[in-house]
Image (cartoon, rainbow, N blue to C red):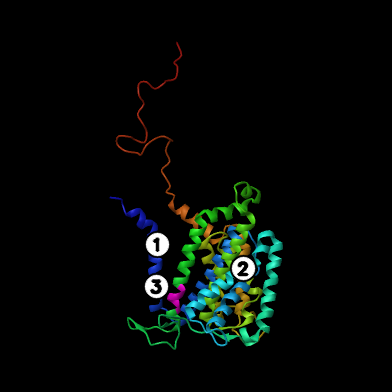
Amino acid sequence: MSDPRPLLRKRGPLLLTALLLCALPFYLDAFWLRIGLFSMAAAIGAVGLGLLSGSAGQLSLGHAFFLAVGAYGYVWLAGEPGPGLSPALALVLAVLLAGAAGGLFSPVAGRVKGIYLGVATLALVFLGHHVLLTADSVTGGFNGRSVPPLELGGFAFAEDGPELTVLGVPFGAEERLWYLGLALFAVTWFTARGLLRGRPGRALVALRDSETAACVMGVHVARYRSAAFVVSSMYAGLAGVLLALSFRRVVPDYFSLALSVDYLAMIVIGGLGSVAGATAGAVFVTALPLLMTRYADQLPLVAAPGSGDGSIGPTEASRYLYGAAIVVILLYAPDGLHGLASRTRARLRRRPSATRPPGTGPVTAANPATPATSDTTARAKEHTP
């Protein structure tokens, strides 16, 4: 019978983390749950951008465009005016719509790389923002549109759904959406890790390290670049749907260039090419401005929102802080928070061993620290008187 302890040591932390996350809605109020929801949505989008920029080595500044496609696609498909589809079907179709948008741009992504691709994707953000402002019948224009609540099997992830109480705790919209966000993030986590550990992930890493070497190994460069862009767009579309459900209203100004820069900051701070690193960076960049907004009156040099006294607001202060974090990461930990955590774990696992000559075993009664000199040991030659 195999020993289950190695499996428990490997899977135990993951199971404990999952149980802790499932128990949080019973103890946290709506503000902290809202931070968690926004962080999970950002983590889904950051994982997709990490696949594109961290693993495939493709710079993209248009991630906000694909989030907008997912968010507005869900709102239009499930709402009125619109087809009025079931919200679950609208969610799936919105993700596919974001993937289709990435597919339309994939010929450019397959042939252009580096800063040139970054400039090309930058045009998507401005084009998308213009369309969101002018297509009033679909997007609602400057004022945006309210988001239809998601329903699965008659269960509504909204306040106006049937009253629900679990173990004496009333479950409102945040509590219900929390478990939806956990499920979507779990799907993102395992699919992205499986993709990176499989043949496509190895091909993307080879393509990032050396395009010539990847071609020699049989990697179709344009095809894999295009596929990475489509998959990243689908993750962004899923993140946009979860963001729309969490905000309950979508407006064009949210999906601006600043949002794309935020996502780049997430993967740089967390660590390029790492699913766990992208998640950590997303939590840091998303939670920091929300926490600073709540505790602005207790922080030095930070003014409360709407004070108008010319001081630094919490949003600007948070951008300065994670901008400084990017500089520190690039100087002292280029592989991000994930690499820093890996090196810390490796140092903690090392046990300082006692200093003894190499090749000697442990100090015991049968094997003393100073071995006795045998008769066959070579002695110094004596001088003849």
- Local SS, label 3: helix
Can you give x and y, in whole percent of width and height, for residue 297 in the image?
56, 82
- The amino acid sitting under disc 2 is Gly
* Res. 266 in view: no
The CA span between labels 3 and 1 is 14 Å
The numbered dot on residue 268 is none
Residue occupied by mark 1: 13
Q: Which residue is drawn at 66% across and 60% down?
A: 110
The numbered dot on residue 22 is 3
- The amino acid sitting under disc 1 is Pro
The quadrant holding residue 233 is: bottom right
Q: Residue at x 62, y 75 (%)?
A: 317
Of circles 3 and 1, the one toward us is 3
Segment tinted magenta in the rendering: 177-181
Sequence-wise, the earlier of marks 1 and 2 is 1
Q: Which residue is drawn at 51% across and 82% down?
A: 85
Residue most toward the left? 1
Can you give x and y, in whole percent of width and height, for residue 367 in the image?
33, 34
Sequence-wise, the earlier of marks 3 and 2 is 3
Of circles 1 and 2, the one toward us is 2
The CA span between labels 3 and 2 is 33 Å
Can you give x and y, in whole percent of width and height, for residue 197 in the image?
50, 55
The CA span between labels 1 and 2 is 36 Å
Q: Is the magenta stretch mostly helix, strand or loop?
A: helix
Residue occupied by mark 2: 102
Residue 316: say if magenta.
no
**Residue density around tag 3, few if under 14, some if 14–19, many if 20 or more, within 10 Å:** few
Closer to the camera in the image, 379 or 72: 72
Closer to the camera in the image, 209 or 349: 209
- Local SS, label 2: helix
Residue most toward the bottom? 160
